[in-house]
């Protein structure tokens, strides 16, 4: 009787719930390891993306299996609801961020390089030497300007009632506060030389690198700040560069209003 009872209890454990949790637990280190290796520059862009995609696909599969397991458990009364719920939780943690970015990006044109001044964009100098040969070109794409104006009409220069030196120091402080990797920093020199900052910014979730160049140019009333942000790899930035430029310019304007 004891053997029969044991077999009966084992049969009432949901195999789907068990497998959903196993898949979810396996997907988590795949995604985390791929992101960590890419951040440490031990894995190049394409293998990193492929590995992350595989991990996210496993997480999605785990979530779907967990949903089926929950339905089956609800109808049959089998055990395993906790495992299915755990699998759903892991899948949600892994998929929520990328899904939100992807959903936003799919509604936007496939751009990788944006500038507040598409007609005369700030030019990469130090970045041209630092970028790997497999990266996107450093030259600003000619086809970007009309698409950018249509998709991001708010991406514009910021004119400040401040000296070029004051504007440069403010923007440099903001860049440092963001912990971007500064490759070059050239302060302005009167009307002879524009100020320029070149830095590398990484996306918060997966650590994808974006190259940023900021130009501070004197004007009759003060200084004009232009920003260009470009994805180092890929064919679509999913709106990341527009968000980065808009946030930096908004913070710049806010700081100057507080400290005129």
Image (cartoon, rainbow, N blue to C red):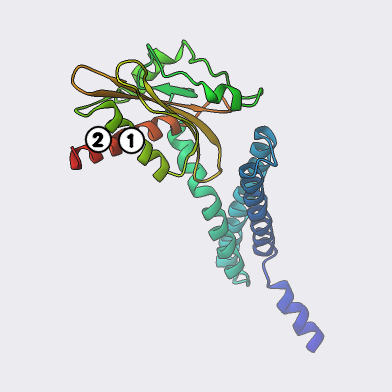
Q: Quadrant of residue 258?
A: top left
Quadrant of the snapshot with the C terminus: top left
- Circle 1 residue: 169
Q: Image point 42% across, 42% down: which residue?
A: 176
Q: With 189 as the anchor, is 257 left or right in this view? A: left
Give the structural element (helix, strand or loop) at label 1: helix
Single out the residue that lies furthest toward the bottom: 1
Please identify, in this view, whether the residue under mark 2 or under mark 1 is nearer the observer: 1
Q: Quadrant of residue 132?
A: top right
Question: Compared to 69, does 151 lie above or below?
Answer: above
Mark before the other along the chain sequence, 2 or 1: 1
Percent position (x, y) of residue 1? 79, 89
Closest to the observer: 67 or 254? Answer: 254
In which image quadrant can residue 46 be found? top right
Indicate the secondary structure of the residue bearing disc 2: helix
Say left or right for 253 vs 173: left
Please name the residue that numbered disc 2 is placed on: 253
Q: Is residue 88 above or below residue 10?
A: above
Measuring 64% from the left and 57% from the top, which residue is drawn there? 24
Query: Measuring 40% from the left and 14% from the top, which residue is drawn there?
Result: 145
**Image location (x, y in percent) of residue 75:** 57, 65
């Amino acid at each position: 009787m004891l053997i029969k009872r044991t077999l009966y209890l084992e049969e009432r454990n949901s195999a789907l719930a068990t497998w959903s949790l196993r898949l979810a637990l396996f997907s988590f280190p795949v995604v985390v390891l791929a992101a960590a290796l890419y951040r440490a520059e031990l894995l190049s862009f394409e293998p990193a993306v492929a590995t992350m995609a595989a991990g996210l696909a496993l997480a999605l599969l785990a979530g779907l299996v967990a949903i089926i397991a929950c339905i089956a458990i609800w109808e049959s009364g089998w055990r395993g609801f906790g495992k299915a719920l755990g699998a759903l939780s892991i899948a949600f943690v892994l998929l929520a961020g990328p899904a939100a970015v992807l959903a936003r990006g799919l509604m936007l044109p496939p751009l990788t390089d944006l500038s507040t001044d598409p007609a005369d964009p700030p030019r990469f100098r130090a970045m041209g030497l630092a970028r790997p040969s497999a990266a996107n070109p450093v030259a600003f794409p000619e086809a970007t300007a009309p698409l950018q104006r249509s998709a991001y009409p708010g991406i514009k220069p910021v004119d400040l009632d401040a000296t070029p030196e004051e504007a440069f120091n403010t923007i440099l402080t903001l860049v440092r506060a963001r912990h971007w990797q500064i490759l070059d920093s050239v302060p302005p020199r009167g009307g002879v030389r524009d100020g320029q900052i070149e830095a590398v910014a990484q996306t918060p979730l997966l650590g994808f690198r974006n190259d940023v160049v900021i130009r501070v140019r004197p004007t009759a009333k003060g200084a004009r700040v232009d920003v260009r942000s470009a994805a180092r790899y890929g064919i679509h930035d999913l709106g990341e560069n527009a968000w980065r430029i808009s946030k930096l310019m908004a913070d710049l304007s806010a700081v100057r209003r507080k400290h005129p």
